[in-house]
Image (tube, rainbow, N blue to C red):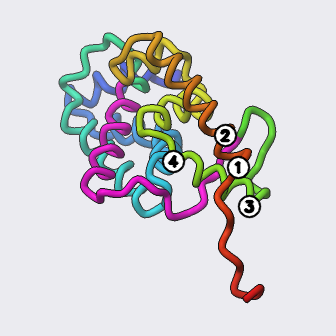
Amino acid sequence: MVPELSDRELLRNFVAGDAASFDALMRRHEDRIFGLSMRMMGNRHDALDATQEAFIAAFKNATKFKGDAQFSTWLYRIAINACTDLLRRKKRLVPTEEVEVEDRGYRIENDVPLRIDLAKALAQLSPDHREAVLLHDVGGFPYEDIAGLTGVELGTVKSRISRGRKKLAQLLEHPAPRAPSKEAR
């Protein structure tokens, strides 16, 4: 039985000409990159586009990976940039679909009103705060990794997460009124 290759080994093999190694990297990371994209973009269609753009960029820039960070950290940075670029092109920041979120043990995917409120609240955060909160609280990245991904100081990351959480709490405590359903009209 052949041991599974690390991300670095797969990337090194890909750069050396083995296309199957990039396919393996993509399969290994596609769910996490799609999840990040879904949370940043707010809808499946845009998340798929951003995920595809991220992997295309990683494919084209594989030779530029210096190895200073983990491959997954480098790929996350590419995905964040792809989402940000797509949002800029679309000139919208408000998610149009519900976002599936897991909150450290308490699963809320069946709590549709809370999911809707959370998606709306996340959309109201500044892009910097939303990015930091999603990376830490949903993605599980430590502060130091987020600082490396976003290119800001550790203190700034902590501040963004703290302020983002505080704003989320305020927005969730006093959500915008829901429009009446069609049946209620």
**Is disc 1 placed on a helix, strand or loop?**
loop
Asked if labels 2 and 4 touch by Cβ distance under 8 angstroms, the answer is: no
- The label on residue 124 is 4
The amino acid marked with disc number 1 is His
Image quadrant where one finds the N terminus: top right
Q: Residue at x 41, y 53 (%)?
A: 93
Asked if labels 3 and 2 touch by Cβ distance under 8 angstroms, the answer is: no
Q: CA distance from mark 4 to mark 2?
A: 11 Å
Q: CA distance from mark 3 to mark 4?
A: 19 Å
Q: CA distance from mark 1 to mark 4?
A: 13 Å
The amino acid marked with disc number 2 is Gln
Tell me the crowding category of disc 3: few under 14, some 14 to 19, or many 20 or more residues within 10 angstroms, Cα based: few
Q: Is 66 on the left-hand or right-hand side of 124?
A: left
Residue 131 at x, y percent in the picture: 46, 34
Residue 32 at x, y percent in the picture: 52, 39
Mark 4 or 2, closer to the camera: 2
Residue 11 vertical placement versus 91 (above, below): above
Q: Earlier in the sequence, mark 2 or mark 3?
A: 3
The amino acid marked with disc number 4 is Gln
Q: What residue is disc 1 on?
A: 174
Q: What residue is disc 2 on?
A: 170
Mark 1 or 4, closer to the camera: 1
Q: CA distance from mark 2 to mark 3?
A: 19 Å
Residues in magenta, as a range: 74-102
Mark 2 or 3, closer to the camera: 2
Does 46 appear in magenta? no
Asked if labels 2 and 1 touch by Cβ distance under 8 angstroms, the answer is: yes
Q: Is 105 on the left-hand or right-hand side of 171?
A: right
Mark 3 or 4, closer to the camera: 4
Q: What residue is disc 3 on?
A: 112
Q: Nearer the viewer, residue 185 or 40?
A: 185
Does 84 appear in magenta? yes
